[in-house]
Image: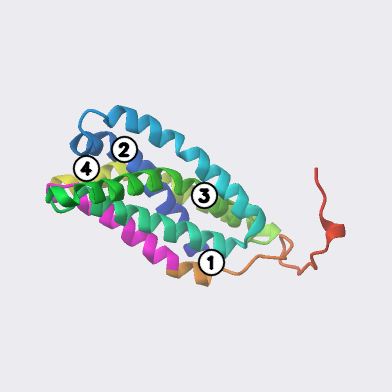
Amino acid sequence: VTMVIMSVCFTLNLVYFGSLFAFPQVLPLLMHGQAASELLVGALWELPGLAMGLLLGITASRRTSLKFYLTALTCSILCFIIGAHGHPDPEQEKAMKVFLFMGYYGIKCVPNIGFIVAYQMSAEVYPTEARSMGAGLALASGRLAAMISPLIYEAAVLWTGSYLFFFLFMAALCLSNLYMVDLLPELAGLQPDGEAVPISPERIQVV
């Protein structure tokens, strides 16, 4: 369980901070004359992601929320790759732009769902005696990914001559995490220490 949680947090931070480093270098190559404004618009797209994370945290189970976030993020990265490396045929230019913007906005929006759900699960999945250690390992793996993500991007560009490998690497990590999520326990209807709780209207309180 700990390794899965650490992998999810590592991938989440690698995608978020890696793309934060990559997009200012990549967008000028793809969006001539509007890269700066698109960076600002992309930052605003993080707000719907936070709202979606809050909604999923309230209405859906943790595993379902993680699967939704990882599926949406994988699709967003693949859409960006398709849009950025589309066929130069003018008839397909509009379709490629749609893929490009869908992927870009998705990469900016979807990780914020993970920041809410993944770290919430990292605290809930452990019993009280081990919660500090478990949550600390999850945070540490995320910080490690945030630190090395620019180095991975630079190494990928240096070795391959293109940013394509970096985005493919992120998509592969997200896809592998999608299958590992099934190894996590389902936390719906459980107290933090794992004791089952019947959910009834009387138990719902608004603070």
| Residues at circles 1 and 2 in contact by the CB criterion of under 8 Å | no
**Range shown magenta:** 160-178
Q: Which residue type does callout 1 highlight?
A: Val
CA separation in Å, label 3 and label 4: 27 Å
Quadrant of residue 172 within the rendered picture:
bottom left
The foreground one among 201 and 133 is 201
| Residues at circles 4 and 1 in contact by the CB criterion of under 8 Å | no
Using residue 89 as the reference point, say whether residue 5 is left or right of it: right
The relative height of residue 186 versus residue 151 in the rendered view (above or below) is below
Q: Which of marks 1 and 2 is in front?
A: 2
CA separation in Å, label 2 and label 3: 20 Å
Q: Which residue type does callout 2 highlight?
A: Phe
Report the disc number at residue 1.
1
Q: Which residue type does callout 4 highlight?
A: Glu
Q: What residue is disc 2 on?
A: 21
CA separation in Å, label 4 and label 1: 32 Å
Mark 2 or 3, nearer chain start: 2
Single out the residue that lies furthest toward the front: 91
Q: What residue is disc 3 on?
A: 113
Using residue 60 as the reference point, say whether residue 159 is left or right of it: left
CA separation in Å, label 1 and label 3: 20 Å
Q: Is residue 127 magenta?
A: no
